[in-house]
Image (cartoon, rainbow, N blue to C red):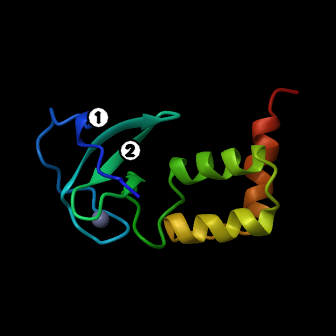
């Protein structure tokens, strides 16, 4: 696995202290473009790419988690799998009712 894609990294910004790598906890992360409007970060320590997550435990669920959940749902994953994946990726496991709320909202516009 070669996850070190240094040529693609946008290094224009100053080092940030807000974002830390979810895999190793390092703050040596750099901007790595964005995906569906979410800023992505590349960790210089372990080379993993993650999305920004400024939320602390107990705070309301960040939009990126909702976006992730919706993307997974579009891929046809069942709620249980989505909860599992969000738990792993974001440390957040929304209830089934919460997920249902997000997805029905998305179906949108009456
Ligand atoms: Zn890392």
Q: Residue at x 82, y 61 (%)?
A: 78
Q: Name the residue that disc number 2 marks.
A: 40
Q: Position of residue 18 (x, y in %)?
A: 24, 56
Q: Name the residue that disc number 1 marks.
A: 8
Ligand 1: image quarter: bottom left
Farthest residue in the right direction? Answer: 110
Secondary structure found at label 2: strand
Viewer-proximal residue among 3 and 14: 3
Q: Is mark 1 within 8 Å of ligand 1?
A: no
Secondary structure found at label 1: helix
Residue 87, disc: none
Among the 4 quarters of the image, the one containing residue 71: top right
Q: Residue at x 45, y 72 (%)?
A: 57
Viewer-proximal residue among 3 and 110: 3
- Marks 2/1 in contact by CB < 8 Å: the verdict is no
Q: Position of residue 20 (x, y in %)?
A: 28, 62
The answer to whether residue 70 is left or right of residue 62 is: right
Say above or below: 90 vs 107. Answer: below
Among the 4 quarters of the image, the one containing residue 5: top left
> In the image, which is nearer the foreground, mark 2 or mark 1?
1
The answer to whether residue 59 is left or right of residue 77 is: left
The answer to whether residue 6 is left or right of residue 63 is: left
* Quadrant of the image containing the N terminus: bottom left
Q: Within 10 angstroms of label 2, few (less than 14), some, or many (20 or more) residues?
A: some
Q: Residue at x 71, y 62 (%)?
A: 82
Separation (CA) of disc 2 from disc 1: 12 Å
Q: Residue at x 52, y 48 (%)?
A: 64
């Amino acid at each position: 696995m070669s996850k070190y894609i240094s040529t693609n990294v946008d290094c224009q910004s100053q080092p940030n202290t807000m974002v830390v790598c979810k895999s190793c906890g390092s703050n040596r992360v750099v901007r790595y473009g964005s995906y569906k409007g979410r800023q992505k970060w590349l960790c210089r320590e372990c080379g993993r790419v993650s999305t920004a997550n400024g939320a602390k435990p107990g705070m309301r669920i960040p939009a990126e988690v909702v976006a992730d959940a919706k993307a997974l749902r579009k891929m046809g994953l069942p709620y249980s799998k989505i909860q599992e994946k969000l738990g792993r990726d974001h440390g957040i496991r929304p209830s089934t009712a919460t997920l249902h709320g997000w997805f029905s909202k998305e179906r949108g516009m009456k």
